[in-house]
Image (spheres, rainbow, N blue to C red):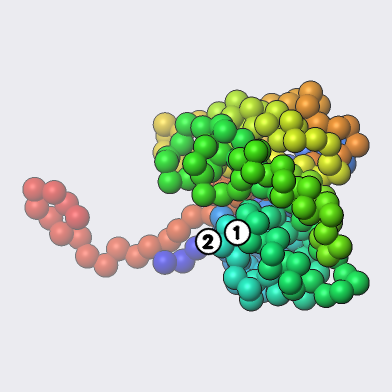
Amino acid sequence: PVLLVDEQALRARAREYADELTARWAQSRVVFASKAFPCTAVQRVMVEEGLGLDVAGGGEILTALKAGVDPGLVVLHGNAKSDEEIALAVEHGIGLVVVDNSDDVDRLEATVPDGQSQDVLVRIIPGVTADTHAHVLTGHEGSKFGLVPADAEPLIRRIEQSSRLRMQGLHVHVGSQILEVEPFAESVAAVARLGEFPVYDLGGGLGARYTWADNPPAVGDYLDSLIGAAREHLPSAAQIIIEPGRSMVCESATTIYRVTTVKHGTITF
């Protein structure tokens, strides 16, 4: 099939996210969740609009670099990062590596050369269960992504003592295709309880309309809730990052197919 993208609509959406976030929290950054549309051309549009890129593996690192991104504006995710992916991140100066487990710390420390350092965030499981499909839930207890606060605390202390890693802050993500604002706000309090840090990445997950029954919140309503919780719980000098994905790209693109055969019968196929 052909994927057809309205470039101006895509750019308008990127600007909407950036403008609406900055209006609510000046020290902030939007990074596009590349996994929602892992295409160099789409990443390039985001880069040209001043956004960073969230990548989830070596392939997305390479396409992000091809798209011309400033490596310092890239956030690397993954709960099973390979040695090659960690080496790519260090070699190319990826801005933030999200630590998902102690194994990430072991291998980052083994990869970062003497005299250099890598900025990291620690991903937290906030204990929030959003109303979405079970396969795209990530903030509930038992999630394979991130660490519960009790397990995160000693890892944070370890990173703070590392000569090769710099503890920049925390990351949280409650899931994908979420059509209500409350879970996003609830997750902020969970990360705030772990202390004050320079950076809080509050993830993405805002849903998009796939059927007429879907009624996703507007970007402004989503950010009113999220940043309202940030004002209540987070230090005012911190940087806030958000990672919109499908809500960034869905409404600007469609898929075109060719009908090759029509089969008539009791049911028409």
181 or 15: nearer the viewer: 181
Residue 165 visible in image? yes
Residue 48 visible in image? no
Sequence-wise first label, 1 or 2: 2
Quadrant in which the N terminus appears: bottom left
Circle 1: residue type: Gly
Q: Is residue 214 left or right of residue 203?
A: left
Q: Is residue 216 left or right of residue 73?
A: left
Residue 120: % across, % down: 77, 56
Q: Is residue 219 left or right of residue 210?
A: right
Circle 2: residue type: Leu
Please tell me whether mark 1 or mark 2 is closer to you in this view. Answer: 1
Above-or-below relation of 91 to 119: below
Instruction: Give me the residue at 60% from left, 70% from top.
Output: 82
Dot label at residue 78: 1
Instruction: Give me the residue at 20% from left, 60% from top.
Output: 262
Mark 1 and 2 residues: CB-CB less than 8 Å, in contact? Answer: no
> Which element is circle 2 on?
strand
* Residue tagged 2: 4
Residue 35 picture quarter: bottom right
Residue 213: % across, % down: 42, 31
| CA–CA distance in space, label 1 to label 2 | 29 Å
- Give neighbour class at mark 2: few <14, some 14-19, many 20+ (Cα, 10 Å): few
Residue 53 picture quarter: bottom right
The residue positioned farthest toward the left in the image shown: 266
Residue 51: % across, % down: 76, 54
Dot label at residue 152: none
131 or 233: nearer the viewer: 233
Instruction: Give me the residue at 35% from left, 65% from top.
Output: 258
> Which element is circle 1 on?
loop
73 or 114: nearer the viewer: 114
